[in-house]
């Protein structure tokens, strides 16, 4: 398993290697028949390839890049890890950042994170 098979909180593992070496173009039916039951790890959660990209109802995938992009487009919040986390930008002076869902943020349940 290569480090290339993990990005944005999504771990493709051996599936990534299999998809990279597959022959394209490939119809969605062929793709899901061959690899649909393979599991993808997302920050402690797992889902099958079919469960993730099946709802797209694509006709065909021309290359591995299209399959990978479909996966990344369809994974939910469970793949991103800790929300509102950034190791690049410290809080600005006077800014009080807290993790989403912190105990004193009950009144912000419907607020979107950016």
Image (cartoon, rainbow, N blue to C red):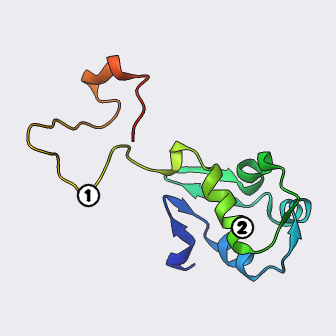
Q: Is residue 51 left or right of residue 112?
A: right
* Residue identified by numbered label 2: 66
At a point 74% along the width and 61% down the height, the residue shown is 38
- Rendered location of residue 41, percent (x, y): 58, 57
Q: Nearer the viewer, mark 1 or mark 2?
A: 2
* Residue identified by numbered label 1: 87
Q: Is residue 110 left or right of residue 31?
A: left
Other-residue count near label 2 (Cα within 10 Å), few / some / many at <14 / 14–19 / ≥20: few
Other-residue count near label 1 (Cα within 10 Å), few / some / many at <14 / 14–19 / ≥20: few
Secondary element under disc 1, as helix, strand or loop, is loop
* Residue occupying the far left of the picture: 93
At a point 74% along the width and 48% down the height, the residue shown is 51
As drawn, 62 above or below 60: below
- Return the disc, 1 or 2, that comes first in the chain's sequence: 2
Q: Is residue 13 left or right of residue 54?
A: left
- Rendered location of residue 27, percent (x, y): 89, 65
Please state, as top left, top right, bottom left or bottom right, where the N terminus lies in the image.
bottom right
- Rendered location of residue 86, percent (x, y): 29, 53
At a point 49% along the width and 60% down the height, the residue shown is 8
Q: Is residue 84 left or right of residue 3?
A: left
At a point 65% along the width and 50% down the height, the residue shown is 74
Residue 84, picture quadrant? top left
Secondary element under disc 2, as helix, strand or loop, is helix
How many labels were placed on the picture? 2
As drawn, 100 above or below 106: below
Marks 1 and 2 sit apart, C-alpha to C-alpha, by 30 Å
- Rendered location of residue 114, percent (x, y): 39, 41
């Amino acid at each position: 398993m290569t480090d290339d098979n993990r990005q944005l909180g999504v771990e493709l593992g051996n599936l990534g290697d299999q998809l990279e070496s597959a022959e394209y173009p490939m119809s969605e039916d062929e793709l899901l028949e061959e690899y649909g039951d393979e599991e993808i790890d997302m920050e402690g959660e797992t889902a099958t390839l079919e469960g993730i990209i099946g709802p797209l109802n694509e006709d065909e995938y021309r290359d591995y890049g299209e399959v990978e992009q479909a996966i990344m487009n369809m994974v939910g919040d469970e793949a991103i890890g800790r929300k509102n986390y950034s190791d690049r930008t410290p809080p600005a002076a006077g800014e009080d950042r807290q993790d989403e869902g912190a105990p004193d943020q009950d009144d912000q349940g419907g607020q979107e994170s950016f």
